[in-house]
Amino acid sequence: MKKIISLISLLLSTVSVAHDDSNSDKKVFSEVVVTESVSMLQGTGGNIGLLKGEDGLLIIDDDYKVNVGALEKVLDRKEGKPRFIINTHWHHDHTGGNEHLGEYVTIIAHDNVRKRLSTAQEIKFFGMKIQASEKPALPVVTFDSSLSLHFNGQELKVVHYPNGHTDGDSIVMIQPANVVHMGDHFFSGKFPFVDSESGGDVMGMIKNIKTVITTLNSEVKVIPGHGPLSTLTDLKDYSHMLETTSAIVKEALDEGMSLQQIQAKGFPGRWKSWGEGFIDEKKWIKMVYISLKAGEHS
């Protein structure tokens, strides 16, 4: 419970916290080597993708604002300041570093990321209200459906997948490294958060994940928005979970059960471990329920 409360307090937090240089960056971020040129940095927010090479540094997402000082220390040990940041979506556990880093780094994201960061937002599911971000935090390069960035001998194909986790999510394919950063479309081994107030939809997420899977090969390295470095098999297991648990909720809903009755019934035992992360079983059932009910009126 303590861990869940801590995570909720951090999620999307916009509280301004001064950089604490006494904290070692090594205590905040751990690095997982993905390929010779790609790493995954794990802090307290969403996983960061790091691409290094002769052109410099590029990062995908930048964790919470409170951790930006530690992140800069990690990057300084590489090849210095990043040239580009790609935001996979607007949530502040993935864009919190924007406000500081955006003073000298080019930020790239989908059109809706800039729209949501530049205006006040509300996450009713958690009873949270989020203030508009300052100008330096806003992406300066935005796109509608996709964008390609050629950097360090790689092509980064940034593709918008609508109405999954939010309405502004992008998935980043890196070739020929054979790496994909999924953003929060993928919580590896856990139930995800689907932000319906920001245009997210469980059914949309299911569709998007199934589409992405068809574009990947068996050797791909998968960086999830949250969780450990993963494989195509892990992503397929996640897709199966999304589809199966949603079908369970839909069947119960079709039988006339209320949300509370469905939550009381729960899922079969095989899905219990998926609720041990940030989103427990009851929260996930509620998210599926909200999406299904919204679909009835769409």
Image: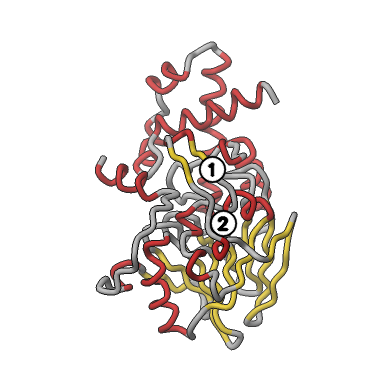
- Colour theme: secondary structure
Query: For this view, does 72 lie left or right of residue 219?
Result: left
Please rate how many residues cluster around mark 1, counting C-alpha atoms within 10 Å: few if below 14, some from 14 to 19, many from 20. some
For marks 2 and 1, the one nearer the N-term is 1
Q: Could you tell me residue 279's position as x and y percent?
A: 40, 40
Quadrant including the C terminus: top right
Report the residue at 55% width, 76% height from top.
Answer: 104
Relative to 71, residue 116 above or below = above
Please state the horizontal and vertical placement of residue 135, each as a whole percent of the image: 57, 62
Residue 266 x, y percent position in the rendering: 40, 25
- What residue do we see at 53% from left, 55% from top? 133
- Where disc 2 sits, the SS reads loop
Select label 2 or label 1 by which is in front. 1
Tell me the quarter of the picture where residue 19 sits: bottom left
Residue contact at pointers 2 and 1, CB within 8 angstroms:
no
Q: Quadrant of the N terminus?
A: top left
Question: Badge 2 is on which residue?
Answer: 182
Q: Please rate how many residues cluster around mark 2, counting C-alpha atoms within 10 Å: few if below 14, some from 14 to 19, many from 20.
A: many
Amino acid under label 1? Gln
**Relative to 142, is 186 on the left or the right?**
left
Whole-number angstrom distance, CA of label 2 to CA of label 1: 23 Å
Kind of residue at badge 2: Met
Element at label 1: strand
For residue 33, the mark is: none
Quadrant in the rendering for residue 205? top right
Query: x, y percentage for residue 101?
Result: 50, 71
Along the line of sight, the residue nearer the viewer: 105 or 149: 105
Q: Check disc 1 and report the residue beneath it.
A: 121
- The image quarter in which residue 45 lies: bottom left
Residue drawn 53% across and 59% down? 134
State whether residue 1 is above or below residue 178. above
